Image: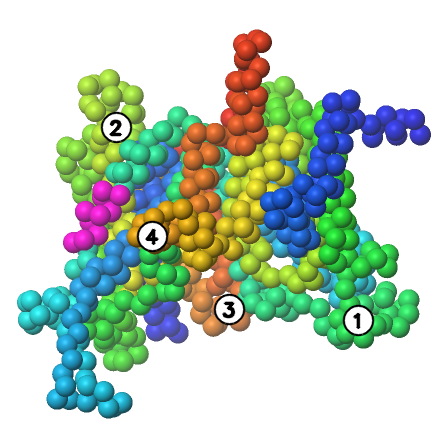
């Protein structure tokens, strides 16, 4: 028993980080309300995409393998969770377990094949697999995925376990956890707890010998080979774990809104998680989660802007000029928010390859420089060679 | 059966031509500058929108109201005449009819300038940085470009008519002595195929038979030595980026009558053409061209009903499947050189 406790415990620094992270996540409804983001739907999205990005970072941040097909696992998790709702029960636990298992197996197959190459070939292989899954989900696999309509709950679903336990209520059921309906804030707190658990696992991996091995793969895979380590099993393990995180996020998406569509597998979705991770900070613990929140926040806020809101915001600009200003700014918000995202992304990659976390570190070191000279070079994104 | 096979073969040629042109540009950029350019599909898309913009300019109209005639709703008839038709008469009408091929004249300088601007302004700073960062920055650039196009031209596909003279179909079957009317092939597709052959031939001839091309090839083989000989190789490579951008743009211009362009056209083609480059072999120009046509034709065969009956859904995934097999079995691609990006 003592052995187990010592295995699950964290170093003092990691424990503090985990506590701070947990508190920040659970208190989101409080500290995000001044930003106008404290409503359950959006908060759920923050937390779910944070899980996705944290899992992606386990692979990309630690080993340097840039997967451009991670959305396939997100989609697989969503489909698996909805099928669990349809066939077994509306309870969230079987759905989560089922989704993680399916996406894990999926990741094992794709990872086994893709990891035989590295660098850009690995990126293209994962991209090819994800595109295949997406195209198949739209066409031949329609009996499983329900094609363009997307997989939905229906009144006449079997739900074997639920029906065995007692009569069913009228109408479409809502996902629940042991009887607790997962809607609104309950749903958010459930997702938040899953995120904290996922973050705990991530912290453990980062500080473990396994994590060290993964970092060694990133810095010099050849040397690892010369020293007699077979790196493949390690890379494959982290690929599968990362795929499971994506599946977990996909399942949570299905739990908060029981619907799964193929567009979750499209490569733009894979690109999005790359953006989140880079924006937040590759290879850092908190960065990807932060990136996910920032992107989802601005996506939500910016895309709600319209010309009316803009001309109110620019009320201080003189009358004749205002229309021009509104017209120009209007290209960057609302429908055009992706333009802003692309620009920010390019700027981050060019000037701040370490993302927001590097920005914070630079600012911190500016303050600290008064006492002692800054040390250490900024983290760079490295390819797997 | 022979007819059906020949027909599918022909159908694959024009799409294969587009793949080959895009992959050729990608390979040129990779071979010269060593940059993995995820924005190359966006250049194809920009080319297509050069054709759209050109047509929109050509068809700017004057509206005159003719009170002597009435339209079916009883209002005075509006007579719309494109300005060019007003200025040039019949020649203007011909210009509007042939707008897609003529817009090549607009696309060449625009694409060359854009390509050189991207290279000098952004990509230049990424030569020494890892491939992962090159992918990321060009991916960001691609998003920016497609969003700009979306905000200017809207999100819907904009169909471009082909010239009236080329709207028919060529009876290929009759030409080679088969029953007339069985194997017909739309003229514009034939034009596209020949056009792509012409461009590919032009690029190869340029690299093979000019001094400039020779220097570029030398630079591809050993950049450092060429630099030590006192040749400003980076300026030539910038020019090659411009050339690659023009090739992608022209491929886009001529493709518009076959597929109405929309803002994410580039991304759709990018993924496919990367696959083409990888299948052909990273850095191999003949490989890119051969793989382009090969995959176009394969895709066309995979969409035959007979094939789909045996392997359902094969038409959706054939290209990716080929890429996966090639990458796993022969990572340097069909015609790739040993040791180039072989990992």
Q: Is residue B106 magenta?
A: yes
Percent x, y of residue B338: 40, 33
- Which residue bears the numbered disc 3? B308
- Which residue bears the numbered disc 2? B234
From this view, report whether residue A205 is shown above or below residue A293: above
The answer as to whether the residues below labels 4 and 2 share one chain is: no
Q: Is residue A185 left or right of residue B339?
A: right
Can residue B213 be spotted in the picture? yes
Badge number at residue B150: none
Residue that appears at 70% across and 37% down: A24
> Could you tell me which chain the residue with mark 4 belongs to?
A
Question: Which one is earlier in the sequence, the residue at label 2 or at label 3?
Answer: 2
- Which residue bears the numbered disc 4? A319
Residue that appears at 30% across and 25% down: B222
Q: Secondary structure at mark 2?
A: helix
- Structure colour scheme: rainbow
Question: Which one is earlier in the sequence, the residue at label 1 or at label 4?
Answer: 1
Badge number at residue A158: 1
Real-space Cα distance between discs 3 and 1?
A: 33 Å
Q: Secondary structure at mark 4?
A: helix
Real-space Cα distance between discs 2 and 1?
A: 66 Å
Question: What secondary structure is the magenta-colored segment mainly?
Answer: helix
Real-space Cα distance between discs 3 and 4?
A: 63 Å
From this view, report whether residue B265 is shown above or below residue B33: below
From this view, report whether residue B270 is shown above or below residue B174: above
């Amino acid at each position: 028993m003592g052995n187990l406790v010592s295995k699950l415990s964290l170093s003092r620094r990691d424990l503090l980080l985990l506590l701070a992270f947990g508190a920040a996540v659970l208190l989101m409804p409080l500290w995000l309300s001044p930003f106008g983001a404290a409503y359950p739907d959006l908060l759920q999205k923050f937390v779910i995409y944070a899980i996705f990005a944290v899992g992606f970072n386990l692979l990309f941040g630690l080993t340097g393998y840039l997967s451009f097909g991670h959305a396939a696992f997100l989609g697989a998790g969503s489909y698996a969770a909805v099928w669990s709702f349809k066939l077994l029960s509306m309870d969230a636990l079987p759905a989560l377990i089922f989704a993680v298992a399916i996406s894990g197996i999926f990741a094992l197959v794709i990872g086994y094949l893709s990891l035989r190459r590295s660098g850009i070939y690995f990126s293209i292989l994962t991209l090819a697999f994800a595109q295949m899954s997406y195209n198949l989900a739209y066409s031949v696999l329609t009996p499983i995925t329900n094609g363009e309509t997307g997989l939905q709950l229906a009144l006449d679903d079997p739900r074997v376990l639920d029906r065995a336990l007692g009569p069913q209520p009228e109408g479409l059921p809502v996902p629940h956890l042991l009887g607790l309906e997962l809607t609104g804030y309950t749903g958010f707190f459930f997702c938040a707890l899953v995120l904290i658990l996922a973050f705990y696992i991530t912290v453990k991996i980062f500080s473990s010998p396994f994590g060290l091995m993964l970092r060694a793969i990133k810095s010099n895979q050849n040397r690892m080979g010369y020293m007699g380590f077979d790196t493949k099993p390690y890379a494959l393990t982290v690929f599968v774990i990362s795929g499971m995180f994506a599946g977990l996020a996909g399942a949570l998406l299905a739990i908060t809104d029981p619907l799964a569509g193929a567009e979750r597998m499209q490569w733009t979705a894979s690109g999005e998680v790359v953006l989140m991770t880079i924006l937040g900070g590759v290879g850092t613990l908190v960065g990807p989660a932060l990136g996910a929140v920032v992107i989802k926040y601005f996506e939500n806020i910016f895309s709600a802007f319209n010309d009316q809101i803009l001309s109110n915001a620019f009320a201080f600009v003189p009358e004749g000029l205002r229309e021009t200003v509104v017209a120009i700014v209007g290209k960057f918000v609302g429908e055009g928010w992706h333009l802003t995202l692309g620009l920010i992304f390019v700027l981050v990659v060019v000037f701040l390859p370490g993302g927001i976390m590097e920005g914070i570190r630079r600012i911190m070191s500016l303050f600290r420089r008064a006492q002692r000279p800054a040390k250490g070079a900024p983290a760079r994104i490295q390819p797997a060679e | 059966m022979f007819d059906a096979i020949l027909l599918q073969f022909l159908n694959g040629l024009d799409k294969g031509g587009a793949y080959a042109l895009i992959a050729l540009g990608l390979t040129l950029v990779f071979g010269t500058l060593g940059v993995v350019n995820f924005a190359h599909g966006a250049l194809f898309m920009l080319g297509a929108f050069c054709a759209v913009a050109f047509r929109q300019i050509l068809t700017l109209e004057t509206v005159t109201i003719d009170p002597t005639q009435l339209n079916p709703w009883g209002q005075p008839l509006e007579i719309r005449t494109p300005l060019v038709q007003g200025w040039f008469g019949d020649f203007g009408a011909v210009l509007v009819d042939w707008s897609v091929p003529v817009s090549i004249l607009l696309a060449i300088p625009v694409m060359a300038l854009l390509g050189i601007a991207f290279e000098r302004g952004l990509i230049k700073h990424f030569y020494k940085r890892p491939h992962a960062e090159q992918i990321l920055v060009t991916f960001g650039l691609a998003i920016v470009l497609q969003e700009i196009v979306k905000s200017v031209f809207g999100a819907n596909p904009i169909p471009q008519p082909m010239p009236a003279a080329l709207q028919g179909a060529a009876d290929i079957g009759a030409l080679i002595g088969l029953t007339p009317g069985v194997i017909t092939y739309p003229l514009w597709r034939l034009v596209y195929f020949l056009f792509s052959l012409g461009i590919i031939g032009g690029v190869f001839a340029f690299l093979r038979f000019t001094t400039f091309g020779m220097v570029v090839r030398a630079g591809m083989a050993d950049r450092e030595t060429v630099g030590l000989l006192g040749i400003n190789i980076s300026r030539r490579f910038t020019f090659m980026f411009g050339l690659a951008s023009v090739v992608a743009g022209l491929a886009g211009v001529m493709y518009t009558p076959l597929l109405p362009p929309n803002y994410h056209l580039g991304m759709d083609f990018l993924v496919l053409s990367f696959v083409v480059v990888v299948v052909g072999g990273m850095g191999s120009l003949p490989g890119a061209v051969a793989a382009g046509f090969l995959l176009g034709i394969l895709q066309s065969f995979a969409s035959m009903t007979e094939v789909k009956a045996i392997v359902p859904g094969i038409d959706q995934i054939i290209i990716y499947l080929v890429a996966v097999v090639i990458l796993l079995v022969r990572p340097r691609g069909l015609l790739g050189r040993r040791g180039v990006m072989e990992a």
